[in-house]
Structure formats: structure tokens, C-alpha cells
Image (cartoon, grey):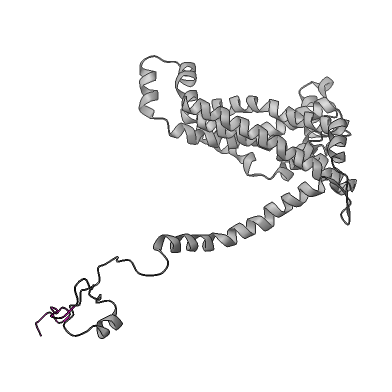
Amino acid sequence: MSGRAWERETTSASPGASPPALSDPLAVAAAPAGTSVVPARPGAARPGMSLQRRETLTALASLAPAFLLIAIVIWYPVAKTFYYGFTNWNGASAKWVGLKNYTKILSGPEFLSALRTNLVFVVAIPGILIICVVVSVLLFEQAPGWRFFRSVYYLPTILSAAVVGLLMRIMFSAQGAMNDILQSLGLGMLTRDWLGAPNTAFVVLVFVFYWQTLGQGVLIFLAGLSSIPTDLLEAARIDGAGWWNRLTRIILPLLVPAIAYFVIFNMIWAFVGVFAMVYTVTNGGPGYSTTPIDLLIYRKAFEAGQLGFASALSIILFAIVLVISAVQIRIFDRLTTD
């Protein structure tokens, strides 16, 4: 036997017979004398499941618990809500009524009033957008006192909506701090019960929206501004471009992705995120004048016991947000790709 103990030349192997691989000890043991044994090649195919199939099954097995949890926590309640929207459901029993709930919602005055409340916040978004962009640019260019104001602007954002709402409710009540400030300034003719009339109640709600959103917007746009090359802004400044020209010709076009995110996020919030703020500031009053759709859902479900009606209203709200978000994403995709 030669020094290569694992390979012997065959003297009697039949033509065309493939030698056994070294990695298969049973085949080596059963091989007839004189058969050459060839070492197995690395990565050689083996019988059974392919590597790609094993990786796919492993990935699916790893994701299955997450998919199951999402299905139980999110999709199952959504499916049940969609079903109960076609029923007269009181929490214990459900009677099929078809489109009756949807017809009642769309033909009644309550839904239109609630939709108007949500649209007030939608219309207010451009105002806070402009304020956030201007403040962000001033902070980015390190205007005097920029460190102090950066902290002050962000402070309301870390407070919960319930805390902010209760604070504003106390501040704008008939005996609140706002009327005291007006009295001390000699503007007693402007004092009023700010939350007692629909118009002034909306003014307070929009003010609260601006006050709490400013820090979030400044943070978003400062992150966007940090991605703009400083050499570009410095070159524009050297060429004599003023602050307004730099803002409109350079900064705003490069901030389109950040603006898109801010607008889409707050548009969705204007429909599904105002509940806590409105509930704590005005409780939807006076009457139903400042009640948004999500607060109307709460009142119909847990105060009036009309759970089927509330389920149908939830599906309508879901459809509104879905359509608005899809349209906005499509518009901003065109702006960023053109």
C-alpha cells in the first residue's frame, strides 16, 4: 500500500463505476478491493432538503410567533370590528342589520360635525409646518440663544397629552391664568370663558396642537438640515444669497422628505390622535361642537352603548385615513423623484 492510504488505484473496477466518497465510511468499507477512494469535495450536494429550502423554513419558523401575535392583537380585532359594523351589537349579542349603521352615520349630523372638527386640525397643519421650518433654520444657523430655545421648544413634546390638556383646561377656564394676564395688561374686555364657546374652544385646541407639536417638528427638521452640506450653504452665503433666498432656493427643496414625513404623520394624527387632547381640554364641548371622530366613537360605544354603530364609524375612519395617507404618499413620491 502506498503512503496515500486513502487512495488506491483500482485493478478490477468495472468501467463507468463512480468511486465512493471518503466522507461516507459505510461506502468505503463496502467498496471492493482495488477500488480507489476519492475524498468528498467540499460543498458537494447531499441527498435530502436543499440549503435554500432549509433556510426558508427556518426563517418562517422564526417569524411565525410574531405573525401569530400580530394576527391575534391586530388583525383579529380589525376583522371583528368590520363584522360588527354590519350588526346591532350591544356587547352581548349582535343582530345583522346590513348597511343600516353606515347609512345612519353618513346621513346624520353627528358625523359631519365630527369630521369638521378633524378638518380644523388638518387645516392648521400648514401653519405649524411653517413655524417649525423657520424655527429649525434659526436654530441650525445658531441664532443668539439657540441652545436655550432648543430645550424650551422641545419641552412640551415630552409631556403627555393628558398633562398638557389638564394644564390648558385650567389656564383657559373662566377663572384661569389667561384671563388674569389679560386683566393685568389692561385688556379686560378680551376676557371670556375660552372653552365655553365653539370658536374660542377651537382657538385653544389649535394653540395646544401648535404648542405640543413645535418640538417634534423642530427635531425632525433639524435632522433633515444636518444632512444638507454646509459647504453648499456657505457658498450661497458668500455669493450674496440672503436668508430668504437660502431658505426657499436651497433648504426647502432639500427638506422635502422631512416635510413629507411631518405632513403625513400629523395628517394621520389629526384623525386618530386628537382624542386625548380634546377629551382633557374641552371634553368635546360645548355640546358636540369640538368632538372629533375618535371621541365620537368613544361616546357612542361606552356612553350610549351603540357598539355596532361605533364599529361602523371606526371602519369609516380607517378608510378615510387610508385614502388620505395613500394620496399623500403618492404626491410626495412624485415630488422626490421628479
Determine the main secondary structure of the stretch shown in magenta: loop
Q: Locate residue 38: give its quadrant.
A: bottom left
> Residue at point 50% right, 24% down?
252
Q: Nearer the viewer, residue 250 or 321?
A: 321
**Residue under the image location 15 percent in, 81 percent down:** 12
In the image, is 254 to the left or to the right of 184?
A: left
Quarter in which the N terminus is drawn: bottom left
Residue 217 vs residue 149, the one in the foreground? 217
Query: Residue 108 placed where, x, y %?
Result: 88, 32
Q: Percent position (x, y) of residue 177?
A: 78, 33
Q: Nearer the viewer, residue 259 or 75?
A: 75
Residue 261 is left or right of residue 96, and the answer is left
Q: Position of residue 275 (x, y in %)?
A: 75, 41
Q: Quadrant of residue 161?
A: top right
The residue sitting at the front extreme is 15
Image-based side of 332 in relation to 29, left or right:
right
Task: Name above or below for residue 119 compared with residue 212.
Answer: above
x, y percent for residue 159: 66, 44
- Segment colored magenta: 1-13
Residue 140 shows in this picture = yes
Q: Residue at x 78, y 37 (%)?
A: 293
Q: Residue at x 62, y 30 (%)?
A: 327
Position of 129 with respect to 239 (left or right) is right
Residue 280 visible within the image: no
Counting the numbered discs, the total is 0
Indicate yes or no whether the magenta region holds residue 102. no
Question: Which residue is the extreme one toward the left?
Answer: 2
Nearest the eye: 284 or 162: 284
Q: In the image, is residue 169 above or below residue 133? A: below
